[in-house]
Image (cartoon, grey):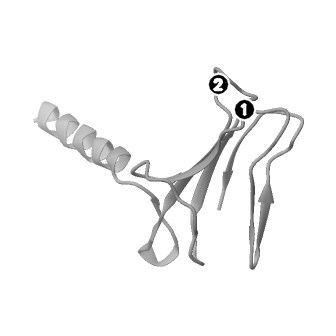
Amino acid sequence: MNHVRLFLIASVAAVGLIVPGSVGAGGAVTPLLTATVGSATAPEAYQISLADSTGTKVTHVDPGQYTIVVHDYATLHNFHLSGPGVDQATAVETPEQATWS
């Protein structure tokens, strides 16, 4: 019986890792976006991207709630997201890992 319970707990935990986004207020799923500046192997490469949870490139973000994970490896440029009601940026001079809501 304990093996069955452990299997069920592990299965539920694994499903939680697979489902993209997170649950916000009211039970709505908050989409997860990932921003990357440079790369771990080439931090100063002028590569700046934003992708959704499937890895698809994002060029426009509709108004709403999002969780954005930023991997900024660069020290010469940064990631800056701005628009109506939004103005978030990483530092230019230092690498930074951040999560924005």
Instruction: Please report the residue visible at 89 percent of the width from the left and 35 percent of the height from the top.
Output: 93
Q: Quadrant of residue 83?
A: bottom right
- Is 8 left, or right, of 94 in this rendering? left
- The front one of 42 and 7 is 42
- Is 85 left, or right, of 61 in this rendering? right
Q: Count of labels shown?
A: 2
- The front one of 2 and 63 is 63
For label 2, the crowd category at 10 Å Cα-Cα, with few meaning under 14, some 14 to 19 and many 20 or more, is some
First in residue order: circle 1 vs circle 2: 2
Residue furthest front in the image? 46
The residue carrying mark 1 is 73
Q: What amino acid is at disc 2?
A: Ala
Residue 30 in the image: x percent, y percent?
A: 49, 66
Identify the mark at residue 40; answer none if there is no mark. 2
Q: Quadrant of residue 47?
A: top right
Residue furthest top in the image? 41
Marks 1 and 2, Cα distance to the nearest angstrom?
6 Å
- The front one of 18 and 86 is 86
Instruction: Please report the residue visible at 34 percent of the width from the left and 53 percent of the height from the top.
Output: 19
**Secondary structure type for disc 1:** loop
Q: Quadrant of residue 37?
A: top right
Residue 6 in the image: x percent, y percent?
A: 22, 35
Q: What amino acid is at disc 1?
A: Tyr
Instruction: Please report the residue visible at 39 percent of the width from the left and 51 percent of the height from the top.
Output: 54
